[in-house]
Amino acid sequence: MSHSAFHYVDGVLHVEGVSAASLAEQFGTPLYVYSRDALTRAYHAYADACAGRRATVHVAVKANSNLAVLNVFARMGAGFDIVSSGELARVLAAGGKAENTVFSGVGKSAAEMREALEAGVKCFNVESIPELHALNEVAKSLGKKAPVSLRVNPDVDAKTHPYISTGLKSNKFGVAFKDARATYAQAHEMANLDVIGIDCHIGSQITEVSPYLDALDKLLELVEQIEADGMSIRHVDVGGGLGITYDDETPPDIGEFVKTLLDHIEKRGHGQREVYFEPGRSLVGNAGVLLTRIEFLKPGEEKNFAIVDAAMNDLARPAMYEAFHRIVPVVKRDEKAHKYDVVGPVCESGDWLGRDRELAIAPGDLLAICSAGAYGFVMSSNYNTRPRAAEIMVDGERARLVREREEVTQLFAGESILPD
Ligand SMILES: *Cc1c(COP(=O)(O)O)cnc(C)c1O
């Protein structure tokens, strides 16, 4: 967790100047709580390291797309990385600009391409030859030229969980490295495309710099070949993926990471190009917690269970990736701790949030599931007809509801029964 935003005062967890216990009382649980200060600090770590260099930050919207979160970044001048036209709509609603937005994703529809072209996005990160053709057609129908970058798959091992590794040959993402030069040549021939950049995104929760440097070396080698073929590559987009500390991981410091990459690019003689970063997790992950209340304690022969009111539908990462999130009491107790599996009420054995956790707790207590700001609320669902949680943004001494808790009637408002 960001060092100052989440801390205990007299044994009670606080988010900036606000007690997490009072937030749970006021807004109910499960409850996502974000710190504006933690978001701001993480963004500044990137932006400050980019200052004075030809480098810009594009916030990966999919990690946390709450309008208030996006707006905090937009106010600081951030660009955005989107993967759907829905995310484009969110960026615009949150005060972001299309001309600072790059459009990533392996399966953009023609309708999405049209919307993004009409809005005037900065670049389409294209992942295949069929997508190049489709984009060229859409641009032609609008009498426009689409700015494009090819997402190249550099075939490097990001040394992360297989589900969140994206830069290997076996992944569905990007144009294979060996085909990239020829694919650029094809793009160059298409009248309604304007080739302006190159990009990659090798995975997520990456805790070492070396995979990035390996990927960069391959990309820059390719850039030299492409320019020899008569195209001009104005920007190099290194993607996102920098990891955070969930448990005992030691990812590089954001500022160090940015400087290392920028220095590497300069040293390789490519300092004239603009560098794009697309961070998601490292901006928002440790800026949010999920508050939940203990419904029951259920001792068992092999395991003790703490059954809480948050579940896999609220935070999917443990069920999906066996991801670890620290779980801490909101109000500390002096009693002896026992070992619990922290589980939700959903009818799935995969519905767990933490395993074998030493906790001193009683029914009715509040727990905070840490590092829940990235891929938390955005992946939540209504499985078991559970309304999605409310979201709160704390700003100093103030807390604001930035998304209302869903009502059950909303969940089936679009459904209907047969007339006869
Ligand atoms: C998911 C994604 C990101 C953000 O990844 P993080 O691991 O959250 O930093 C950036 N770029 C692209 C293309 C992505 O798909």
Image: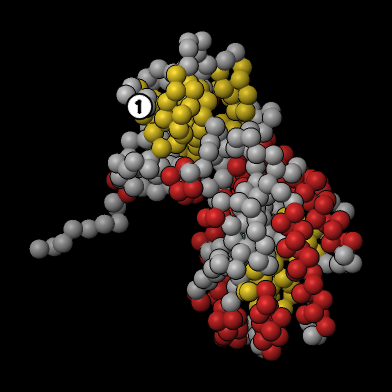
Assess disc 1: are there few (<14), some (14-19) or many (≥20) residues with their C-alpha within 10 Å of its C-alpha. few
Q: Please, which residue is most extreme toward the left here?
A: 420
Residue in front for this viewpoint, 52 or 255? 255
Q: Where is residue 69 in the image (x, y as percent from the top left)?
A: 60, 45
Residue in front for this viewpoint, 217 or 95? 217
Render colour scheme: secondary structure
Residue under the point 44% across and 23% down: 339
Residue under the point 48% across and 16% down: 337
Residue under the point 48% across and 44% down: 322
Q: Position of residue 381 (x, y in %)?
A: 40, 48
Q: Where is residue 139 in the image (x, y as percent from the top left)?
A: 60, 82
Vertical side of 266 occupied by 134: above or below: below
Residue in front for this viewpoint, 305 or 413? 305
Residue in front for this viewpoint, 379 or 115? 379
Vertical side of 272 occupied by 133: above or below: below
Quarter of the picture holding the N terminus: top right
Q: Please, which residue is most extreme toward the front here?
A: 302
Residue under the point 40% across and 42% down: 312
Q: What residue type is labelled 1?
A: Glu
Quarter of the picture holding the C terminus: bottom left
Quadrant position of residue 277: bottom right
Quadrant position of residue 395: top right
Q: Does the residue labelled 1 lie within 8 Å of ligand 1?
A: no
SS class, disc 1: loop
Vertical side of 236 occupied by 16: above or below: above
Can see residue 298? no
Q: Name the residue under label 1.
A: 302
Q: Position of residue 39 (x, y in %)?
A: 66, 41
Vertical side of 403 occupied by 126: above or below: below
In the picture, measured across the screen, residue 405 lies left or right of residue 347, that is: right
Can see residue 205? yes
Q: Please, which residue is most extreme toward the top here?
A: 334
